[in-house]
Amino acid sequence: MNFLLNHIEALIFCSPKPITIEDLVGCLKEMFEAYIPVEDVQLAIESIKEKFSADDFSFELIESGGGYQFLTKPAYQASIGILLKQQSKKRLSTSALETLAIIAYKQPVTKSELEQIRGVNCDYAVHKLLEKELVEIKGKAETVGKPMLYGTSQQFMDYFGINSLKDLPTPKDFINEENTIGEKKD
């Protein structure tokens, strides 16, 4: 089992994005020229999780973005914060974050719908989000001019550490309240 465990650990470590169990099984099948049961891969993942949960390691195995990846532990937030501060030139602007939030909650959405909600031109923000691969073109709307429809990408899921859009927080502004007109009756 250690042999299999080491291969799975190496695959997860070298993957540039969260790797799924199906991808792990496919790689292992090609490597060993034999089918490795999903249950064996899942057991190995649990063993790896347990191994890296020890205080000896600065990172741990996390399920994120529909797969598994190694992430640093919260105890190292301060030192990582310094690194991220130094790399802050690569951060998203406030307008890009606002645009991304609208896309995440309203997708698929056209640029004109984004601009209507934000009240400003969104060309630059959408361009930057596409460039950073946080959003992608999901198709074209069936309206006049057939404008592009934008939605979040898998990179968005990875970046924010979520497995599905259902993991996004529910904004209070989107909740429909009953009895908004008049007084509440008992």
Image (tube, rainbow, N blue to C red):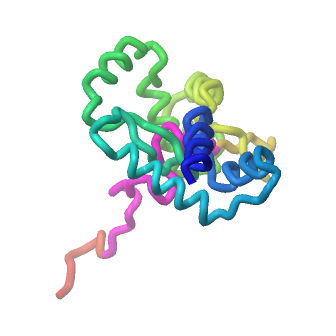
> Residue 129: x percent and y percent?
58, 29
Identify which residue is drawn at 60% across, 46% down. Answer: 3
Where, quadrant-wise, is the C terminus in this rendering? Answer: bottom left
Q: In which image quadrant can residue 12 be found?
A: top right
> Residue 143: x percent and y percent?
77, 50
- Of residue 12 and residue 170, the one placed in the foreground of this image is 12
> Residue 71: x percent and y percent?
43, 37
Where, quadrant-wise, is the N terminus in this rendering? Answer: bottom right
Q: Is residue 161 magenta?
A: yes
- Of residue 53 and residue 122, the one placed in the foreground of this image is 53
Q: Is residue 91 left or right of residue 134?
A: left
Q: Is residue 127 left or right of residue 93?
A: right
Visible in this render: residue 113?
no
Q: Residue furthest left?
A: 186
Identify which residue is drawn at 55% across, 35% down. Answer: 13
Q: Is residue 19 magenta?
A: no
> Residue 57: x percent and y percent?
34, 35
- Of residue 67 and residue 120, the one placed in the foreground of this image is 67
Identify which residue is drawn at 42% across, 14% down. Answer: 87
Q: In which image quadrant can residue 114 be found?
A: top right
The tally of labels here is 0
Numbered range of the magenta stretch? 151-178
Q: Is residue 105 above or below residue 180?
A: above
Q: Is residue 28 left or right of residue 134?
A: right
Visible in this render: residue 88?
yes
Q: Is residue 40 above or below residue 71?
A: below
